[in-house]
Image: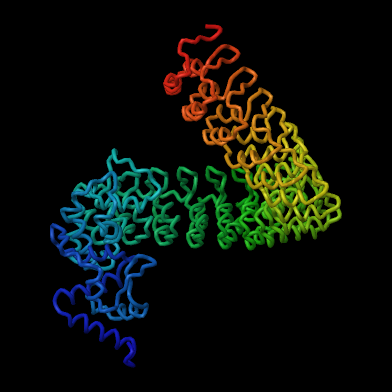
Amino acid sequence: MTDGLGLGDAYDATLDRIKGQGGRKARLGIAALMWISHSERPLEPDELRHALAVEIGSPSFNSDNIPSIATLLACCQGLAVVDKGCSTIRLIHFTLQEYLRAHPEIFGAAHSTIAETCLSYLDSQQIRALPTGNLPGFRGTPFLEYSSLYWGMHAKKDLSDCAKRLALKLFDGCGNHVSAEILFKEQHPFGYFDSNKPFLFSSLHWASIFGIDEIVAGLVEVEGCDINGEDYVGSTPLRWAALNGHEGVVKMLLGRGDVIPDKPDKDGRTPLCCAALNGHEGIVKMLLGRDGVSPDEPDKDGQTPLCCAARIGHEGVVKILLGRDEINPDKPDKYGQTPLYCAALNGHERVVKMLLGRGDVNPNRLNQYSQTPLCCAARSGHERMVKILLERDDINPDKPDKGGRTPLCCAARGGHEGVVKMLLGRYNVNPNGPDGDGRTPLCCAALNGHEGVVEILLARGGINPDKPDKDGRTPLCCAALNGYGRVVKILLARDDVNPGKLDEGGQTPLFCAASNGHEGVVKMLLGRDDVSPDEPDKDGRTPLCCAALNWHEGVVEILLARDDVNLDKPDKDNRRPLCCAALHGHEGVVKILLGRDDVKPDKQDVYGLTPLCCAACNGHEGVVKILLGRADVDPNGPGEDGQTPLCCAASNGEEEVVKILLGRDDVNPNKPDKWGQTPLHCASENGYEGVVKVLLRRGSVNPDKPDKDGRTPLCCASENGHQGVVKILLGHEGANPTKRRKLG
C-alpha cells in the first residue's frame, strides 16, 4: 500500500499473495476473509477458528482442524487483525470491507457456504450430544451460539440445496436440540424456561423465526404439520413470523385455510400485536385484511396493538390502525396507560399529534397513578411534547397526580428548565402548588440542586421562597441538606428567606448541612449574622454534635473556630460531641476535640458512660488509646451501673480493648460493678473465651470472686452453657469448682 498504487490495486495484490500461498494456507486465508466480511456480527477469534475447522456435511467435528490464531492471521497476509479492545477479529480497514463487497466473485456463494458450515456444525455428533434444559457455557463450543442464532439469516439470503438438506436434518428431533433452545431464549429473553416441561418447538416454528420461505413452503405441505401448533410460550409459527417481520412467510401461512390468524401466545399477544410492536407495516396490513383478526385485542397487560405501536413510536403502524373504525384510540391498559400516554412517555411527537387529532382521545386521561400525559412528558423533560400538549385548550396544565405532583412540580424536580418556563407561561398554573409532601416546585428544585430552575422560579412574581414542606423544611433547608451550595447562595441572597428557620425536628439549615458534612454550605451559613451556630434540635443535638457523630472532621473544625460554639453542650441523653465521636469510633474527630483546652474528656452521659466507656464498649481501639493518653481520663471511671471501661469491654467481648486496658498499671482488673460482677464475671457470663484467657493471665485477677448473689465466674459460665469458658476456668488453679452460689 506504499508503492503508489490505489487501494484497490493494493488489495488485489494482497489477495494474489494469499492465493499464491497455495493449498490449505490459501483456502484458510480466503475463508477467513469471507467469514469476517459476511458474518452477521463481529466474531471472536475462537468462534472463527472453530468455524474454519468445520467440514461441510461431515457427521463429526474434528478439533484437529482448528487453526491457531497466529496461523490464521498469517494466512490473511495482514488483511485481518484481532481487535483487543473488543476481543473480536476484524478487517484491517473499512475500505477493505467495501472492496470485498464490490467483488463478490472472490468468495462465490458466501452466505450459502456460511449457512452450510453452521448447519454442519449443529448436525455434528458432538453438538447433538449436548444436553438441553440447562444451557451449557460456550467455552468448549465457542461456535455454538453464532451457528444457532445466525444460520437461518445466512440461509434466507442464499439457500443452497445443500443448506436445505442440512436444515431438514437439523429439524429431526429439533425439540431436543440445544441450538433450538439457544434460539428460543434469544427470541424470548425475559421468559422463564422450565426444563421439566415439554419444549414443543417444531421445525415450522424454527423456519418461521428465520423467515426462510422455501423451507416453510415445504414444511406446511408435510402430512401432520400443525400450522397452529404452540411452542413453550404459546407462540404459533404465524406469531413468530409476524414478530420478526417475515412478510413472505406470513403471506404463505395466511393463505392456508386452517390457520388461526388471531391466536395469542401465553402473554395474550396476537400476531397483529407482535407485528405492531416491531413496526412491521406490511404484515399489519396483511393481518388486518383477514376477517378473523381483531384489531383492538388487548394482551394480558391490557395493551392493544395500537398501544404497542404508540409506545415504540411506529408512526406508520399507528396510522394504519387508526384507519380502522373498530379501533378505540383511547383504550387504556391495565395500568391506565392509553396510547397517548405511552407515546408521550417515550417522546414520540408525531404519534402524539396523530392521536390528538382524533376527537375521541382524552388528553387529560389519568393512568393508575393519576398522571396525565402532560405530567408524564414534563417529568421526562420532553419540551416539544409539552409544547404540543399545551397547545390544546382542553389540557389541564396543573392537574396533580396521586402524589400531589403537578406537571410543574415534576419538571422542577427533574431540572427541566425549558418545560418549567413553558408551564410558568400559563396563567392557570400555580407556581407554589405543593405536592403530597407539601413541597412546592421551588422546594423540589432546591432539594435536587437544580439552580437554573430555582432562578427561573424565583424570578416569577408570587413565589414564596420560604414555604416549608410537611416536615417543616424550606427550600433553603432542602438545598443545605444535600449540599447544593449554589442553590443555597441564590436563596440566601433573598431578603424574604429565613436562614435560621427550624423544621419539625427543630433542625436549622446549618444543622442539616453540618449533619451531612457539607463544608461549603456550613461556611456560607456561618457567614450570616442571623444564623445561630449552636442551635440544638429537638433531641438537644447541636450542629457540632451531629458533625462529630457523623465523622465530618472538616465541619467540626469550622464550627470549633467559632467563639460562640459550646464544645461541651450536651444533648438530651447528656452526650457531648466527644462522647458521640468516641461512641462511633471517629478517631480524627476525637483528636480534634481533645485538642481544645475547654473539653471535658471524662464527662458521663445520662447512662453514666464516659467517652472512654463508650469507646471500650464498641471496640474502638484507636479511640481508647487516644483517651488513655490523657491525664484527665480515669481508666477505672465507673458508669451508672458501676461498670468500668474494662468491664464494658469484657461484657462485649472486645478482646483487643481488654488487652490495651490491662496494659495499664493503674487499671483495676477486679473492680466490680454494682452487682458485684468483675470483668471476669462479665466475660464468663457471655462466653467470651478469648477475654477470659486474657484476664486470667493477670496474676491479680481473682477467678473465684463471688458477685452479690454469690456466683463465681465459673458459676456464671456454667449457668449459661458456655462449656469452653468452664473448661478454661477449671484449668486455672484459683477456680473452686465446689463453691456454690448463695441461693444454691
Residue at coordinates 57% horizontally, 63% vertically from top-left? 350
Residue at coordinates 47% horizontally, 30% vertically from top-left? 690
User: Residue 667 occupies which quadrant of the picture?
Assistant: top right
Considering the image in quadrants, where does the N terminus appear? bottom left
**In the rendered image, the vertical position of residue 600 relative to residue 555, given as above or below:** above
Q: x and y percent of residue 600 in the render?
A: 74, 38
State the residue in front, 267 or 691.
691
**In the rendered image, the vertical position of residue 449 relative to residue 604, given as above or below:** below
Q: Is 430 displayed left or right of 251 in the figure?
A: right
Q: x and y percent of residue 627 in the render?
A: 65, 39
**In the rendered image, the vertical position of residue 106 relative to residue 301, given as above or below:** below
Residue at coordinates 24% horizontally, 75% vertically from top-left? 74
Q: Look at the image and tell me whether residue 367 can be seen.
A: yes
State the residue in front, 595 or 84.
595
Q: x and y percent of residue 298 in the render?
A: 47, 46
Residue at coordinates 52% horizontally, 17% vertically from top-left? 704
Q: x and y percent of residue 597 in the render?
A: 76, 44
Q: Look at the image and tell me whether residue 162 can be seen.
A: no
